[in-house]
Image: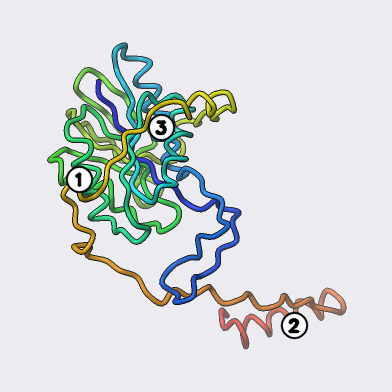
Amino acid sequence: MKIFVCVKQVPDTETKIKLNADNSGIDTAGIKWIVNLYDSHAIEEALKIRDANPGSTVTVVGVGPKRINEALITAMAMGADEAISIDAPENIDSLLTAQALAKAIGSADLILTGKLAIDDNGSAVTQQLAEFLGMPHATVVSKLVLNGNKITVDREIEGGAKEVLELTLPSVIGCNRGLNNPRFASLPGIMKARKKPIKELTLSQLDVNIEQRKNQFTDFQMPPPKPAAKVLQGSIDQQVHELVKLLREEARVL
């Protein structure tokens, strides 16, 4: 089987975000970058499927600035066989990302992605990639069973319910937490992965024009600071009375 995993590099969840001078995005200086958390589940599932199907290979593919190679090295340290890096500006949109991925992948038996990226929460690339490649797809997948050329998945839907789908390979699957427990990339694994070649492509080589992106974002704003907490004084009865008053007059939830 030819298995591909799409990987995005995102800011670490503990990174303190700052906006750049013109508020067109975040200031990337000094940010610690990591593999998107949901993509880690996709990598782990791909490795499990490969190991259960001798002769299969796992190729990780990433779109973004040159630093995307670090995320691909992490994926190879986890166990991926090969990597493809597509050089693209920070502000590429989901449509062109999916188009570039589709052209770089070409043909595959199975493509795994994260259900969304934790930086923009777009949740669009998986579906668009499937459309470009003409493959069936499912996303928010928390269970996956492969049987021959059929793949059965459980996906979470509204109200805490689950939907069970059967797809025919080749397919595109967007992975959710709960699907597995991703392994860690060990230091020896990272050192070994750095010696592996990464196939580097550009958007122009894939005939993808950045000027054709459909979405551009401007005027980013940081969320307003949280108001200071109020500490109620007095007896329990006085505190309850004051709390009810605040909920009614300030919060207006009563």
Separation of residues labelled 3 and 1 (CA atoms): 26 Å
Q: Residues within 10 Å of mark 1 (few under 14, many from 20)?
A: few
Q: Amino acid at mark 2?
A: Glu
Circle 2: element type:
helix
Residue 237 appears at what percent x and percent y?
Answer: 81, 77
- The residue sitting at the bottom extreme is 249
Which of marks 1 and 3 precedes in the sequence?
3
Q: Amino acid at mark 3?
A: Ile
Q: Amino acid at mark 1?
A: Gln
Residue 102, compared with residue 44, is above or below; it is below
Separation of residues labelled 1 and 2 (CA atoms): 66 Å
Residue 148, compared with residue 221, is above or below; it is above
Can residue 154 be seen by looking at this rendering?
Answer: no
Disc 2: which residue: 242
Disc 1: which residue: 205
Q: Residues within 10 Å of mark 2 (few under 14, many from 20)?
A: some
Circle 1: element type:
loop
Residue 206 sits in quarter: top left
Disc 3: which residue: 43
The residue closer to the viewer here, 102 or 198, is: 198
Residue 10, compared with residue 136, is above or below; it is below
Q: Residues within 10 Å of mark 3 (few under 14, many from 20)?
A: many
Circle 3: element type:
helix
